[in-house]
């Protein structure tokens, strides 16, 4: 499949009428476009943003059915409240779940409850959200989970996930920490696959390189500015950037390829660490402890 497809083009002909699609981070970038296109194809979008106000504004811009929800991924209580809200909606099944929200390359170390903030936001927040929603995933009809990772997962520390430095206090590097959180996304998808009911599946993906608010830190520091410069020729539009999320969330071809990682709407290669089952199992159990499951 051509790598320049847009989300609208890749979902051409898809009928999502009656389907429920949860998308995190709908107020910006790829998440906004993913939510828009899933609603365009008929899904009712449960759209989360860090505040209810942001989610409401984003939903108001969606042409179709959508429900605004607050979900601040660094706040475990807020994630639990979001899940309570969803349960009150009397939904039997979430058919599509796109774990999209994220932050990248914070220039200096920031922590949430003693954990490095990119790992806390990109991995742990989604880990708790998805786990709390498990009873709604695949119970009455197949669920597709799309976890938005990144090719930057290859920049994770040598050992994959550095469990001795989840606080980030030893040797903090903005890109290594981002890479680690995105590696965690893939390892999480692989393990989640084994815990979902038959016919449901979870897949991680790289959306491409897209100029969104994610790059807000890239103007800071010589390395980041240089990186932004050399990435420019490889960039795609937001409409194209949402294509792989929408492909993974909706396309028939995915059924036979459970657990794989996608980029440009095709199966793509991951780093060796991303294929390490023992590492994925260890991440799962440590994540459970960290979020209090
Ligand atoms: N853009 C790229 O080139 C690229 C490449 C590879 C992977 N990705 C991945 O694609 C995903 C979407 O990124 P994007 O490019 O669309 O970036 P974006 O425009 O910055 O959107 C990120 C979204 O995540 C939300 N978010 C950030 N921190 C959050 C938190 N603590 N709790 C809840 N939501 C939070 C943001 O909310 P606020 O607006 O309120 O901060 C926003 O809605 C990310 O997972 C990113 O790692 C992007």
Image (spheres, rainbow, N blue to C red):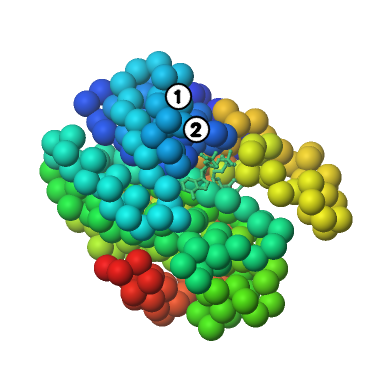
Ligand 1 within 8 angstroms of badge 2 C-beta: yes
- For marks 2 and 1, the one nearer the N-term is 2
Nearer the observer, 77 or 227? 77
Query: Circle 1 sits on which residue?
Result: 57
At x 38%, y 76%, the residue is 286
Q: Which mark is residue 16?
A: none
Residue highlighted by disc 2:
27
291 to 149, vertically: above or below: below
Count of number-bearing discs: 2
Q: Rounded to the nearest whole Å, what is the CA distance between mark 2 and mark 1?
A: 8 Å
Of labels 2 and 1, the one closer to you: 1
Which quadrant of the view contains residue 92?
top left
Q: Is residue 204 left or right of residue 258?
A: right
Left or right of residue 30: residue 248: left
Quarter-of-image position of residue 235: top right
**Which quadrant holds the N terminus?**
top right
Instruction: Identify the residue shown where x is 49% and y is 56%.
Output: 122
Circles 2, 1 touching at the beta carbon (< 8 Å): yes
Residue 49 appears in the rendering: yes
Check the image and name the residue furthest to the top: 63
From the top left corner, tell me how far across and down residue 147 is, in percent: 44, 51
Tell whether 243 sits left or right of 292.
right
């Amino acid at each position: 499949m051509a790598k320049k497809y847009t989300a609208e083009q890749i979902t051409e002909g898809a009928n999502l009428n009656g389907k429920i699609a949860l998308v995190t981070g709908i107020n910006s970038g790829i998440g906004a476009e993913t939510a828009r296109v899933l609603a365009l194809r008929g899904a009712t979008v449960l759209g989360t943003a860090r505040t209810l106000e942001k989610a409401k504004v984003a939903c108001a811009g969606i042409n179709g059915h959508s429900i605004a929800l607050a979900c601040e991924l660094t706040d475990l209580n807020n994630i639990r409240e979001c899940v309570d809200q969803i349960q009150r909606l009397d939904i039997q099944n979430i058919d599509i779940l796109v774990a999209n929200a994220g932050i990248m390359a914070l220039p200096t170390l920031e922590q949430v409850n003693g954990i490095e903030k990119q790992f806390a936001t990109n991995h742990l927040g989604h880990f708790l959200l998805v786990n709390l929603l498990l009873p709604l995933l695949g119970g009455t009809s197949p669920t597709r989970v799309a976890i938005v990772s990144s090719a930057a997962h290859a920049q994770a520390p040598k050992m994959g996930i550095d469990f001795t430095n989840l606080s980030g206090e030893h040797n903090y590097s903005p890109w290594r920490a981002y890479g680690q959180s995105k590696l965690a996304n893939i390892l999480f998808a692989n393990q989640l696959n084994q815990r979902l009911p038959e016919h449901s599946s979870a897949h991680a993906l790289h959306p491409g390189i897209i100029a969104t608010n994610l790059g807000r830190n890239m103007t800071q520091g010589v390395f980041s500015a240089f990186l932004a410069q050399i990435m420019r020729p490889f960039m795609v539009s937001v409409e194209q950037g949402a294509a792989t999320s929408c492909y993974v969330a909706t396309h028939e071809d995915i059924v036979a390829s459970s657990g794989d990682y996608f980029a440009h709407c095709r199966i793509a290669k991951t780093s060796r660490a991303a294929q390490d089952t023992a590492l994925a199992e260890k991440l799962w159990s440590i994540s459970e402890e960290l979020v209090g499951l």
